[in-house]
Amino acid sequence: MKQSIKLTVDAVVFGYEAKTETISVLLVKRKYKPFQGKWALPGGFVLQEESLEDAVERELNEETGLQINYLEQLYTFGQPERDPRSRVVSVAYFGLIKPSNFKIAAATDAEDVQWFKTTELPKLSFDHDKILKLAIARLKGKITYEPIGFQLLDNKFPFSDLEKLYTTLLGRTIDRRNFRKKILSLNILDELDEKISRGSGRPANLFKFNKERYFQLKNEGIIFEI
Amino acid sequence: MKQSIKLTVDAVVFGYEAKTETISVLLVKRKYKPFQGKWALPGGFVLQEESLEDAVERELNEETGLQINYLEQLYTFGQPERDPRSRVVSVAYFGLIKPSNFKIAAATDAEDVQWFKTTELPKLSFDHDKILKLAIARLKGKITYEPIGFQLLDNKFPFSDLEKLYTTLLGRTIDRRNFRKKILSLNILDELDEKISRGSGRPANLFKFNKERYFQLKNEGIIFEI
DNA sequence: TCATATTAGCGTATTTTATACGCTAATATA
DNA sequence: TATATTAGCGTATAAAATACGCTAATATGA
């Protein structure tokens, strides 16, 4: 067996800001060759005795200092020529973080770390463009049949944040009344006895995603769908 | 970099027989240690300069002689202890073959190859039980929102074959009239000027999945859904 | 302090889609 | 030629999705 393949993990981490209604991706500036000085997805080599998930979380923490909120495997990229140095296969992950976490990024490690709006992306290293493209498609697709959107909002959020998130992700206007009816009929949101006022306009009630209830419904075969 | 991780691919290949209404999985009996003599998913080490897809197709061909009809990446399994020998990460694939191909299996290589009904599975080697379980879930889930079912039927098939396949996969009865209406309204089947008679009963018209039309509709944003 | 701008919150009518339901047609076989 | 078997199809009802516009509560600027 002459196989000598290196294994890496890469992470596509999305963040959302309701104020500007933008989805951003976390990128790091590469310190070493190849693609030195270019932007890339955070990631790196898997340690010998470490699970893939541990590897992603370690790399993310080392490079960005961020606490991830939701993480799932995206796809494994293994084209022989994807790394100019040698054969490197990368298991890509897909992550989401909450806005409160969003703000503290870029605060930790040596390399440059930055949030990029998905509409203003730089050219990326390796095949990371391809990975990112797939991740964006996954995010947009998944949001309609699994409640991962809540992972991009704070624990307590006004309904309008959710609405704006869906408008942004789906790239089209949605009817506010019908959307509210639909989401509330799913019975996975708890309305709190708390209001929030952000600038002008009527203060909004805060909601909370009820994870327990969601999993209970899921077990009963009731499916989330927008 | 002290990393020395081996990379393998494994394939979960499903076949369907309308006569018995059973879904089967292709398994091979292991020739060497570990798990010598035990059943496992077909697969093996990725060659140094080979893409992951090429590796799966090569291994499948070497071990079973089968031509695969549909192949997609399933998930990458990387728990450190999943192989007792050393660190081995496996990229699992999900494949479907048509009944005509189904029959010629087990005809080629040295190891023992066999179809197992998904209801009568043996204990598998490594973490292959877990992989198979995920693949079955994927098959059952995917069939409702992508027309992969046609990959399990012959090119020309009577409508009842499709109906039986869905009944089997979904594990519940479906209303024949409503199912027919729904599928035909999708406009992705061509009704042929050909009939088939299998034993008693009224001979059935043959249908053909219109791939071009499906992709055209898909591009227009029209989604297949059962 | 009051007029204006801004965001939140909600109901009903209409259209579309899903579901429920049972008979006749064409063949093989006994 | 009678019987068993599979194929093929329509209509009525229920459920879900969509379309649509006003009032409430606050901030802000005149």
Image (cartoon, coloured by chain):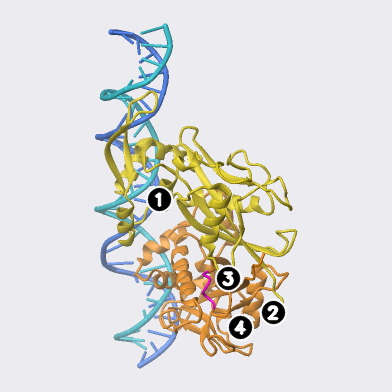
Chain colours: A yellow, B orange, C blue, D cyan
Chain of the residue where label 2 is placed in the rendered structure? A
The three-letter amino acid code for the residue at tag 2 is: Met
Residue A147 is tagged as 1
Q: Are marks 4 and 3 in contact (CB under 8 Å)?
A: no
Q: Secondary structure at mark 4?
A: helix
Precedes in sequence: disc 2 or disc 1: 2
Q: Position of residue B107 (x, y in %)?
A: 61, 88
Does mark 1 fall on the same chain as mark 2? Answer: yes
Residue A191 appearing in the image: yes
Disc with the residue nearer the chain's start (4 vs 3):
4
Q: CA distance from mark 2 to mark 1?
A: 45 Å
Rounded to the nearest whole Å, what is the CA distance between mark 4 and mark 3? Answer: 22 Å
In the displayed structure image, the side of residue A103 where residue A2 appears, left or right: right
The residue singled out by tag 4 in the image is B64
Q: Position of residue B14 (x, y in %)?
A: 51, 75
Instruction: Say if mark 2 contacts mark 1, CB within 8 Å.
Output: no
Q: Amino acid at mark 3?
A: Val
User: For residue B89, which numbered disc appears in the image?
Assistant: 3
Mark 2, other Cα within 10 Å: few <14 / some 14–19 / many ≥20:
few
Give the residue pinned by disc 2: A1
